[in-house]
Image (cartoon, rainbow, N blue to C red):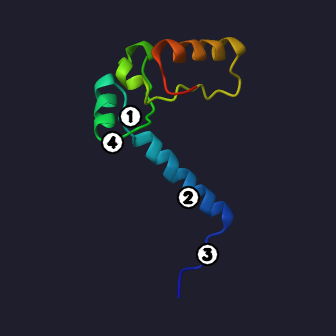
Amino acid sequence: MTDAPLDREMLIDLITREVMNTLANRTDICATPEKLRNAVANGADRVAYHGDASSVPLDLAKTIDHTLLAPDATAEQIDLLCEEAARYRFASV
């Protein structure tokens, strides 16, 4: 009826290779303020932006969740993240 089921390790390897390939070939659709504006104009209500916080147009900052995804983040880094979010009016931290 169907092919033999994949074993768990083979399936994990297959999925991992697919994800890594996708990440290696992706383009960041919000790499510049212009691209960010285009994503919002096309219906995005929350986006990721990987540029400098100060380069985000104020009218678009409300669409960005300002994050620091580092397990070893320091209290000072978190304080800075919160200060930037307040200064540039990001949607959340």
Q: Residue at x 28, y 33 (%)?
A: 38
Q: How many marks?
A: 4
**In the rendered image, which residue does mark 1 sit on?**
28
- Separation (CA) of disc 1 from disc 2: 24 Å
Measuring from the top left, give residue 46's x and y in whole percent.
44, 36
Q: What amino acid is at disc 3?
A: Pro
Measuring from the top left, give residue 45's x and y in whole percent.
40, 38
- Separation (CA) of disc 3 from disc 4: 40 Å
Q: Categorize mark 1 by other alpha carbons within 10 Å: few (<14), some (14-19), many (20+).
A: few
Secondary structure category for the residue under label 4: loop
Q: Earlier in the sequence, mark 2 or mark 4?
A: 2
- Separation (CA) of disc 3 from disc 2: 13 Å
Q: Nearer the viewer, residue 28 or 83?
A: 83
**In the rendered image, which residue does mark 3 sit on?**
5
Q: Earlier in the sequence, mark 4 or mark 1?
A: 1
Measuring from the top left, give residue 9's x and y in whole percent.
67, 61
Q: Categorize mark 2 by other alpha carbons within 10 Å: few (<14), some (14-19), many (20+).
A: few
> Quick check: marks 2 and 4 in contact, CB under 8 Å?
no
**In the rendered image, which residue does mark 4 sit on?**
43
- Separation (CA) of disc 2 from disc 4: 33 Å
